[in-house]
Amino acid sequence: VSRNILTRALGLEPNVTIDYDYLKINTGDRFLLCSDGLYDMLSDNELASLLGRTHDVEGIALDMLELANARRSKDNVSVIVIAGL
């Protein structure tokens, strides 16, 4: 799990340069797209542990959301978990 900073955003400028890459996605791979309202409230180890659970990605996302809310995140919390099939 790596934390990143916002370097570009939609809506700030009329044009946005898009970075992209191709990568192989294997069965069991998980990707987390989230706002800082989530990653400011959960540690890297907690995020990795939750992503490693065997239940469905919707359940993982809900668990992350509930934990962030239980810790009284003062920011909005957005979570998307994607699994390779």
Image (spheres, rainbow, N blue to C red):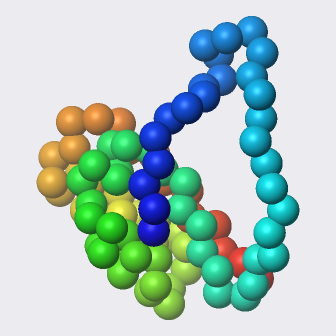
Q: Is residue 26 above or below residue 42?
A: below
Residue 21, image x and y in percent? 80, 56
Res. 63 in view: no
Q: Please name the residue shown 47% across and 48% down the image.
A: 4
Q: Who is closer to the viewer here, 57 or 5?
A: 5
Q: Is residue 43 above or below residue 33?
A: below
- Quadrant in the picture for residue 73: top left
Q: Residue furthest top?
A: 14
Q: Is residue 69 above or below residue 9?
A: below
In this rendering, position of residue 69 left or right of residue 17: left
Q: Please name the residue shown 67% across and 11% down the image.
A: 13
Residue 44, image x and y in percent? 33, 67
Q: Please name the residue shown 29% across and 35% down the image.
A: 75
Q: Quadrant of the N terminus?
A: bottom left
Residue 40, image x and y in percent? 28, 49
Residue 60, image x and y in percent? 45, 72
In this rendering, position of residue 18 left or right of residue 83: right
Q: Residue furthest left?
A: 71
Q: Quadrant of the C terminus?
A: bottom right
Res. 34 in view: yes
Q: Please name the residue shown 29% across and 73% down the image.
A: 46
In this rendering, position of residue 66 left or right of residue 34: left
- Quadrant in the picture for residue 77: top left
Q: How many marks?
A: 0
